[in-house]
């Protein structure tokens, strides 16, 4: 496959291509019977979205959904608004609606999308997004305990929200981290341990918006996460030493040409592999960036490097650098050199999503959603909008660079849409969300009803073949 990105003609994407090997194939959809709609008479609309979905037993999933009820201006043209909503992925901008009710909720879904149970609404679960990039609310399953069988990790409020097996709300737990990333659940046969990854700073920053988060100066973390035992309501530090970690990274970090890299302490972060087992120890991804010119958290020059290791109660195992680099430099385009394992981006780059998955001991995959901007003529960057690049990197072992699947490739999108769509729904996969099987992944999707106007919340299920 030739890795490419559809961009305006003024933005050149230079790409080095290689023969196609791994690929994504359609496996099916999970369509939830919660139609988004708006009443022409009352102007009251309803919108459902499925954000994440994880296995919760045989042919069952725990899904994180958002639900909103709103009222449009009663003088607005209802047909025009419905047409605008259908043409813009549910987004209406010509009229600002009055929000009557919104929030996040949990659903137990059968494999065919049937809703088996639905959580009570609670003001503790607002439909809010964390201002830190790469920080997402996710559902969690710990159903062998009564303390917190099902949960929502809610980074925007820095809380863990617990629900019982019937999805009744049990209460919340505060999380002592400033930034919260994807978690990991382990089980020793008696108790669950929730490993919460992110960053804790010496002084907690006051952050209320994306602009606030972007304006923070790069600062080293004093902790990269905590462990939480739900049935003991106890928080413990991660079993690792941040200073020792930085020293080890500094010792082995190499650039694309084998050169030694001086790493910026503020760039170090840890994320767990999003695998389906609950064993300990488990794989983690460690990332860092060379000490180049840091104008802000979004704008910098340098090379991003990635490592993996095993983490457990006894600490962090041997670090192994992956043969893959992201270089931020003075340039006005994006270049993907698959043979060398190098992505070259402009200096403005935001990591909106990073997920790692293992396949046995040596094969792995990374999902990247990167937001970037090209410089203006004077070298400055527009802070209000950005382009997106979504990539799936498949490593066959850790000695050679990954095969890269461009999830924005129009040819892939057309093929998947044709294979996933039914006589009732047109299905368009949009964004990788979760791993739900050994080689199966749930993608957020736009599911439009062929007869009548409206959309259904759904997930497209794609399989990775390699």
Image (cartoon, rainbow, N blue to C red):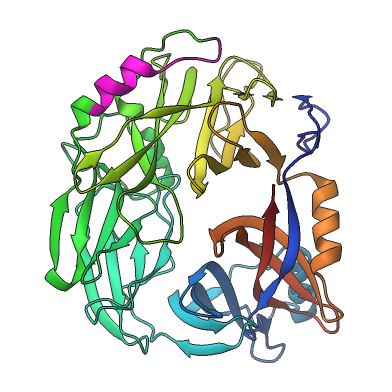
Residue visible at 37% across and 50% down in the picture: 181
Q: To which quarter of the image does residue 338 belong? A: top right
Residue 84 placement (x, y as % from top left): 76, 68
- Whether 341 is among the magenta residues is no
- Whether 252 is among the magenta residues is yes
Q: To which quarter of the image does residue 244 belong? A: top left
Left or right: 54 with respect to 405? left
Answer yes or no: is residue 92 visible: no
List the single residue furthest toward the front: 361
Quadrant where the N terminus is found in the figure = top right
Left or right: 99 with respect to 168? right
The magenta-colored residue range is 245-257
Q: Is residue 95 above or below residue 403?
A: below
Residue 93 placement (x, y as % from top left): 66, 62
Residue nearest the observer in this picture, 64 or 228: 228
Secondary structure mostly taken by the magenta-highlighted segment of the chain: helix
């Amino acid at each position: 496959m030739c890795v490419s990105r559809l961009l305006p003609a003024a933005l050149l994407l230079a790409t080095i291509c290689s023969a196609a090997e791994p690929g994504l194939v359609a496996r099916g959809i999970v369509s939830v019977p919660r139609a988004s709609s708006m009443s022409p008479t009352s102007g009251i609309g309803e919108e459902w979205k499925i954000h994440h979905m994880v296995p919760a037993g045989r042919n069952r999933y725990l899904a994180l959904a958002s639900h909103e009820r709103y009222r449009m201006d009663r003088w607005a043209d209802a047909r025009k608004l419905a047409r605008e909503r259908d043409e813009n992925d549910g987004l209406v901008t010509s009229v600002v609606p009055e929000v009557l009710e919104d929030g996040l909720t949990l659903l137990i879904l059968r494999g065919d999308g049937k809703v088996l149970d639905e959580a009570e609404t609670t003001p503790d679960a607002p439909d809010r997004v964390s201002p830190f990039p790469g920080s997402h609310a996710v559902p969690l399953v710990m159903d062998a305990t009564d303390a917190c069988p099902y949960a929502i990790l809610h980074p925007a409020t820095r809380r863990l929200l617990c629900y019982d097996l019937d999805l009744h709300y049990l209460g919340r737990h505060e999380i002592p981290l400033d930034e919260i990333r994807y978690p990991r659940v382990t089980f020793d046969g008696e108790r669950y341990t929730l490993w919460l990854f992110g960053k804790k700073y010496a002084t907690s920053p006051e952050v209320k918006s994306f602009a606030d988060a972007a304006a923070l100066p790069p600062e080293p973390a004093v902790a990269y996460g905590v462990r939480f035992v739900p049935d003991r309501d106890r928080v413990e530090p991660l079993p690792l030493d941040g200073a020792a970690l930085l020293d080890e990274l500094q010792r082995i970090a190499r650039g694309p040409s084998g050169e030694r890299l001086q790493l910026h302490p503020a760039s170090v972060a840890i994320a767990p592999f999003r695998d389906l087992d609950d064993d300990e120890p488990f794989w983690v991804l460690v990332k860092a960036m060379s000490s180049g010119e840091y104008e802000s958290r979004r704008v910098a020059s340098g090379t991003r490097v990635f490592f993996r290791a095993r983490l457990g109660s006894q600490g962090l195992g041997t670090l192994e650098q992956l043969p893959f680099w992201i270089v931020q430099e003075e340039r006005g385009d994006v270049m993907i050199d698959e043979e060398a394992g190098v992505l070259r981006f402009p200096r403005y780059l935001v990591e909106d999503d990073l997920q790692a998955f293992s396949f046995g001991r040596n094969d792995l995959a990374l999902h990247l959603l990167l937001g970037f901007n090209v410089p203006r003529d004077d070298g400055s960057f527009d802070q209000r909008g950005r382009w997106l690049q979504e990539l799936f990197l498949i490593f066959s072992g850790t000695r050679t660079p990954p095969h890269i699947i461009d999830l924005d490739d129009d040819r892939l999108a057309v093929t998947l849409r044709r294979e996933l769509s039914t006589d009732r729904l047109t299905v368009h996969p949009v964004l990788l969300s979760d791993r739900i099987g050994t080689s199966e992944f749930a993608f957020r999707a736009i599911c439009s009803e062929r007869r009548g106007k409206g959309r259904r919340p759904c997930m497209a299920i794609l399989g990775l073949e390699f």
